[in-house]
Image (cartoon, rainbow, N blue to C red):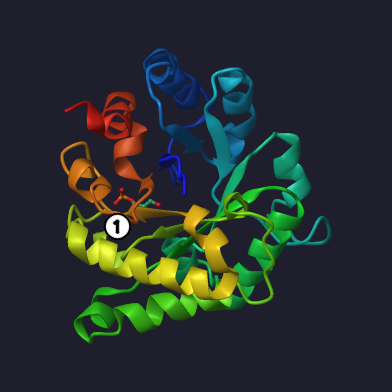
Amino acid sequence: MSRTPLFAGNWKMHKNVKETLEFLDDFLPLAKDISSEIAIFPPFTSLYAAAEKIKGSGIKLGAQNMHWEDRGAFTGEISPPMLKEIPCDYVIIGHSERRQYFAETDDTVNKKVKSAIKHGITPVICVGESLEQREKGMTLSVVLAQVEKALSGVQIGCGNDLIFAYEPIWAIGTGKVALPSDAQEVIGAIREKLCKLYGNVAQDIRILYGGSVKPDNIKDLMAQPDIDGALVGGASLDAKAFYQIATYNRG
Ligand SMILES: O=C(CO)COP(=O)(O)O
């Protein structure tokens, strides 16, 4: 079992081209010093400029969403081949903000996951429960159902073909991070489910935690056996904070 930690910055609807390049001016010199894998997920309009700027740096690039079809009359959408051309390594699929505000369903998540893998783009599949679901004791059933539906009919060749991110909705942008032991319980259950679906190869699938990750809480999260990194929102917009998260193990 060897899972390289991944720190992924989901910038959401932040940073135009100029701001993206300014961030990278600050971050690239720091990143030389990071042994974990780093990926940034700028808005679509900043992807190409970011790709050009990070060439040769080892930093990976991802998009925050995509359509599952290669082309067609889908006004406002972006296709997998368009992301490949940038080039993007990763794509976030099923973020709770897309499920909540943009009618993303388990069915569209499943279509996008299949399409991403077919095109050689690694999907970062987001799952997570609402506060109401947690309070009703439904966390595991909700999250595991999301996992199962996302992967319906999905074949994988190896553990690097996909990544999961467990993001409890109540922890996103609220400053309320999940207790490391609670995050471990859910992420451990996700891995068990993946083992049932894919056998031993599931030990190589990376599962990230997301939701109010900051430099001062990452160490305890990373101490959990099944947490392989973080999907970071707000703190990834600041080069220094993102660097501190990615180098949490320096003490
Ligand atoms: O949604 C998130 C990452 O995808 C988490 O956002 P915050 O880190 O801002 O809570």
x and y percentages locating residue 117 in the rendered image: 69, 56
- Please name the residue shown 57% across and 35% down the image: 61
Q: Element under label 1?
A: loop
Task: List the single residue furthest toward the right.
Answer: 72
| Horizontal relation, residue 84 to residue 182: left or right | right
User: What residue is rendered at 73% in x and 50% in y?
Assistant: 80
Instruction: Give me the residue at 37% from left, 69% from top.
Output: 128
Direction from residue 63 to residue 126 in the image, left or right: left
Location of residue 8 by image quarter = top left
Q: Quadrant of residue 179?
A: bottom left
Q: Which residue is mark 1?
A: 172
Q: Amino acid at mark 1?
A: Ile
> Along the line of sight, which residue is nearer the eye, 217 or 156?
156
On screen, residue 233 above or below 168: above
- Residue at 21%, 56% in the rendered image: 174
Rendered location of residue 227, percent (x, y): 34, 53
30 sits to left or right of 4: left
Mark 1 within 8 Å of ligand 1, using the beta carbon? yes
Q: Quadrant of residue 168?
A: bottom left
Say which quadrant the C terminus sits in: top left
Number of residues whose C-alpha sits closer than 10 Å to that of mark 1, classed few (under 14), some (14–19) or many (20 or more): many
- 149 vs 167: above or below: below
**How many marks on residues?**
1
Whole-percent x, y for residue 77 in the image: 69, 55
